[in-house]
Amino acid sequence: MSTDEDRPEEGSPHFVRELIAADVAAGKHGGRVQTRFPPEPNGYLHIGHAKAIWIDFGMAQEFEGKCNLRFDDTNPVAEDVEFVEAIQRDIRWLGFEWTPPVHYASDYFETMYACAVHLIEQGKAYVDSQNLDEIRARRGNFYKPGEDSPYRGRSVEENLDLFARMRAGEFEAGEHVLRAKIDMQHKNLNMRDPLLYRIIEQHHHRTGDAWCIYPMYDYAHPLGDAIEDVTHSLCSLEFQDHRPLYDWVVANCPVEGKPEQTEFARLNLGYTVMSKRKLRQLVEDGHVDGWDDPRMPTLSGMRRAGVPPEALLAFCERVGVSKRDGVVDLSLFEHAVRERLNEVAPRYMGVLRPLKVTITNYPEGEDEIFDARLHPEDEGYGTRALPFCRELYIERDDFREDAPRKWFRLAPGKEVRLRYACLLTCDEVIKDAAGEVVELRCTWDPESRGGRSPDGRKVKGTLHWVSARHAKPASVRLYDRLFAAENPMEGDGEDGKSFLDHLNPNSLERVEGAMLEPALAALGAGESFQLERLGYFCVDSDSAPGEMVLNRTIGLRDSWAKLAKKLGA
């Protein structure tokens, strides 16, 4: 058994690493390190799970140990093969691999049943015939001790008979449950004769209809760890009050392994919800476009948004591993994403809302190629060819007919630099019948090829652009935070309030008719890049031949810059 008093306190960014290092140095568990990642296959993994994966798999790697992947599939009502497959994809996307084979709690159902029979035979478990409301009422609370069930005194023989008949399917769901016989006066509510088995008449994704009774998570989880001979059972802080029950199950069941549970603070992120139940509600009620919607905090959503897995791992390292819950500022995560993408994303140009520019002193029907670097800080990325001709597109927001004094972009009579290309001056504005600007007629300085100033004159404004004749069409999805409130769960369920009330109505803007430089057509689904001056994007899997679909990963502006400088990032 273990207590908080004999565990190291938080004193570094990763107290779990220190704990395991001390165990290995002391020869505990024979110096062996065996961890496991035990998700329930009832939804997609989210960013909170990324931290758990980083700890479970990372510690096994660091100490040359093993890490199992075990699906705690004890509730067939909510589980599905879809989730099993998605979880495996997400783990591999983060760069980790489990020790084969994949394990399932359902692999051990016979062993778990035998352990339950053993507990009954030892007088440590009994079949309770109260309904759940009655059990709940007798459980008490923090201020009121629990009351014994009227069925607590059943004989071993009667309990064995009833439990066997439960397995045989003789009873309806809710008619009986199996409970541990511990202490209804215990100060920890989890120890007040917790449920071990319940009747569920539901097809299981692996065992089919072989079982109609299923172990509770708090019973199955420690047994799974013990059966697999896990040494360090690492879990989030909400399981701290469950640790006495974890230890009780391991100590009282006939299993050889003696795992030790250690809890760490879960990853809570601002402007986000982490509850699988809430995420499922967002999906099933149509507030998002599936579990992999780029606005979701799921790993599949982040992958589709173009978030690099290395950024997630760097973020986890920066947040650290502590024993105190808290909410991490979302801008810290956004900084990690920008930091990684700035290092690895090639640069291209695209125009989201095109405004036509005609260069009147450029020969009709001709074009030329300018050379542009794919990365400003890494020559190893090479260059790409930028075609240039008489008709171009610039961003509509980069032009104002009545420009303010400190306007450094395009306006009538004003000169700007077209990135990598030339200096350009606006001479004439063409409008349609409704008075909307539809074309700019400009002149270029041929001596400024490549974007240089031939006589040293200063030109402050630099615009991105694409050649109209060579441009590739695209649809662009501009994603923002899904919630407008930093804590969407605040007040949820009170006075008719819901976390859904905090949904950001502007979390998605769809832009049609965007134009991209032709080199982007070579990129495939999932590839990330920077559209200069606009942000980081990736190619979506919805892209079809002839028209790309882009997802904006994140904007260029780093709202966390001051904090990053303070931390020396």
Image: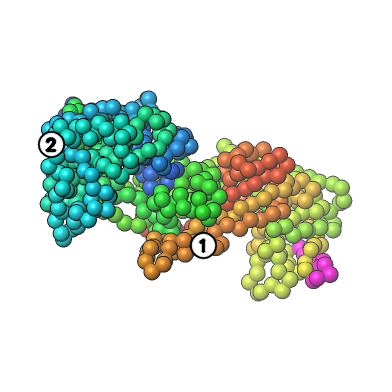
Give the quadrant of the N terminus: top left
Disc 1 is placed on an element classified as loop
Based on the displayed image, in which of its 4 quarters is residue 494 positioned? bottom left
> 193 or 234, which lies in front?
193
Span shown in magenta: 423-435
Give the residue pinned by disc 2: 155
Q: Is residue 85 above or below residue 134?
A: above
Residue 21 percent across, percent down from the top left: 22, 36
> 232 or 151, which lies in front?
151
- Could you tell me how far apart the alpha carbons at marks 2 and 1 are, in whole angstroms? 58 Å
Q: Is residue 304 above or below residue 554?
A: above
- Tell me which amino acid carries mark 1: Asn
Residue 457 percent across, percent down from the top left: 69, 62
> 472 or 297, which lies in front?
297
Q: Nearer the viewer, mark 2 or mark 1?
A: 2
Residue 72 in view in this figure: no
Q: Residue at x 66, y 56 (%)?
A: 511
Residue 354 in view in this figure: yes
Disc 2 is placed on an element classified as loop
* Residue 348 shown in magenta: no
Give the residue pinned by disc 1: 504
* Residue 425 shown in magenta: yes
